[in-house]
């Protein structure tokens, strides 16, 4: 169902892919948008226990696309350095294919948003974090992407380097 990587020597291991997903702070979520056009939007995210989580408003292009078609992909670029004299780019990236869903259960939604808040604001106090979550709870939507396929690739100049 998912294509094999053509340049297998450049493939990242699943452990390397997971490390990139855990360490990243921004990626691009791609959905089937209006009129058959792809809709790709940069988002902050959380990779936790093998799934990806995103926060969103309860309405808009992203949610309309999800409700039409739950299949999605999410790409994180961990390294991107142009090597002009070599006419190449030193890169490492991961792409996740899976199905997206809106978390309906308040306990699931709360656990995801608390963990996401801890990722991006680890120094925040529990009281302030609770206040922010309570303030934004009404219009808050949390999306969960369950991976069906994960692959990663690196530039040929990075093969064998940490």
Image (cartoon, rainbow, N blue to C red):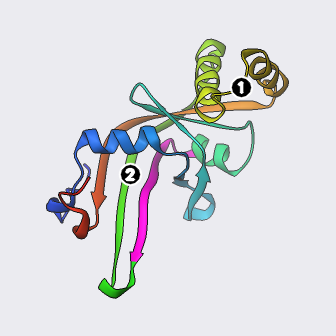
| Frontmost residue, 127 versus 32 | 127
Q: Residues within 10 Å of mark 2 (few under 14, many from 20)?
A: many
How many numbered marks have been drawn onto this rendered protein structure?
2
Relative side of 57 to 21, left or right: right
Q: Position of residue 124 (x, y in %)?
A: 71, 26
Is 87 or 151 nearer to us in this picture? 87
In terms of secondary structure, where does tag 2 sit?
A: strand
Residue 102, above or below 5? above
- Give the residue at x 58% y 17%: 108
Q: Examine the rendering and report whether any part of residue 98 can be seen.
A: no
Asked if disc 1 and disc 2 are in contact, CB closer than 8 Å, the reply is: no
Helix, strand, or loop for circle 1? Answer: loop
Q: Residues within 10 Å of mark 1 (few under 14, many from 20)?
A: few
Q: In terms of secondary structure, what is the magenta stretch mainly? A: strand
Nearer the viewer's eye, disc 1 or disc 2?
Answer: 1
- State whether residue 33 is above or below residue 125: below
**Where in the figure is residue 150, as x and y percent of width and height?**
32, 44
Name the residue: 29% across, 44% down: 16
Q: Earlier in the sequence, mark 1 or mark 2?
A: 2
Q: Quadrant of residue 112?
A: top right
| Circle 2 residue | 95
Residue at the farthest right position? 135
| Residue on which the image places disc 1 | 124
Please tell me which residue is depicted at 75% across the width and 41% down the height of the picture: 59
Read off the magenta span: 68-82
Q: Which quarter of the figure has residue 107? A: top right
Name of the residue lying farthest toward the left: 9
């Amino acid at each position: 169902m998912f294509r094999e990587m053509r340049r297998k020597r450049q493939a990242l291991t699943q452990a390397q892919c997971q490390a990139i997903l855990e360490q990243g702070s921004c990626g691009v979520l791609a959905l089937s948008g209006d009129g058959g056009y792809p809709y790709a939007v940069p988002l902050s995210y959380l990779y936790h226990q093998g799934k990806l989580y995103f926060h969103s408003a309860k309405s808009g292009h992203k949610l309309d696309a999800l409700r039409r078609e739950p299949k999605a992909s999410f790409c994180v670029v961990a390294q991107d350095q142009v090597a002009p004299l070599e006419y190449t780019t030193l890169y490492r990236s991961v792409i996740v294919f899976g199905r997206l869903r809106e978390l309906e259960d308040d306990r699931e939604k709360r656990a995801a948003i608390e963990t996401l808040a801890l990722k991006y604001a680890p120094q925040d106090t529990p009281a302030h974090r609770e206040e922010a979550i309570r303030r934004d709870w009404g219009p808050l939507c949390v999306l969960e992407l369950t991976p069906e396929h994960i692959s990663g690739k690196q530039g040929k100049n990075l093969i064998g380097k940490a």
